[in-house]
Image (cartoon, helix red, strand yellow):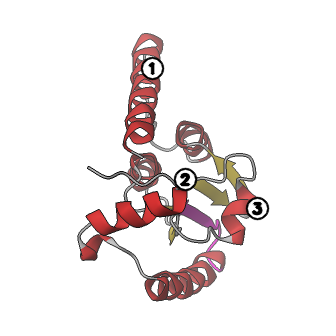
């Protein structure tokens, strides 16, 4: 198997191995951003503004979305083009790692999925995401850490 050497040729190689319905075009991203702006205007008029900078295939982004859904928090999903030009909003919101997910709560960015989920649980305390027992919470945090390390390792190995 001929594996490309440069990062841009790896991306092209990676894209060429995906079915066409998995690829997101720049027109789709532009359309989603317009839709996002409309939803943001609706949310802003009703209180908290919550936006997730995400990528459809990221398990870390899925974790954040699940937490928001469990809490019943209305939010806007803003799809990032990780294989093309990253948005200015992503680069400004997460200047250190420049990766998703990033939660924007009333314009304030929070990065890293486990940190975001903890933040969500603290800001919207109505229904806790973690067990009430301290031991069970510690066990849950252990598995979050374990999965983070294993999934990150797999992603880095594949990419």
Magenta region includes residue 112:
no
In this picture, residue 93 sits left or right of residue 116? right
Is tag 3's residue or tag 1's residue first in the polypeptide sequence?
3
Residue depicted at 73% across the width and 64% down the height: 107
- Mark 3–mark 1 Cα distance, whole angstroms, equals 33 Å
**Residue 83 position within the rendered picture, expressed as x and y whole percent measured from the top left:** 50, 65
- Label placed on residue 137: 1
Residue closest to the far front: 2
Kindly identify the residue that appears in the image at 64 percent across and 68 percent down: 49
Front: mark 3 or 1? 3
Depth check, mark 2 against mark 1: the one in front is: 2
Read off the residue under disc 3.
92
On screen, residue 117 above or below 26: above
Q: Earlier in the sequence, mark 2 or mark 3?
A: 3
At 37% from the left and 43% from the top, the residue drawn is 158
Residue lying at 41% horizontally and 23% vertically, measured from the top left: 146
- The CA distance from mark 2 to mark 3 is 13 Å
Q: Which segment is the magenta one?
A: 45-53
- Left or right relative to 3: residue 54: right
Q: Secondary structure at mark 2?
A: loop
Q: Nearer the viewer, residue 137 or 90?
A: 90
Disc 1, SS: helix
Label ID, residue 101: 2
Across and down, in percent, residue 77 comes to 49, 68
**Taking 51 as reference, is 129 above or below it?**
above
Q: Dividing the picture into quarters, in which one does residue 122 lie?
A: top right
Q: Which callout, 2 or 1, points at the residue further toward the start of the chain?
A: 2
């Amino acid at each position: 198997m001929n594996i490309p050497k440069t990062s841009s040729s790896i991306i092209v190689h990676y894209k060429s191995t995906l079915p066409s319905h998995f690829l997101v075009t720049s027109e789709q991203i532009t359309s989603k951003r317009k839709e996002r702006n409309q939803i943001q205007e609706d949310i802003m008029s009703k209180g908290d503004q919550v936006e997730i900078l995400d990528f459809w295939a990221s398990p870390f982004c899925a974790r954040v979305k699940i937490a928001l859904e469990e809490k019943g928090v209305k939010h806007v999903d803003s799809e990032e083009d990780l294989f093309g030009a990253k948005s200015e909003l992503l680069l400004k919101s997460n200047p250190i790692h420049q990766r998703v997910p990033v939660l924007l709560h009333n314009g304030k960015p929070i990065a890293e999925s486990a940190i975001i989920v903890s933040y969500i649980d603290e800001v919207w305390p109505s229904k806790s995401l973690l067990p009430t027992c301290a031991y069970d919470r510690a066990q849950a945090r252990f598995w979050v850490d374990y999965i983070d390390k294993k999934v990150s390792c797999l992603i880095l190995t594949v990419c």
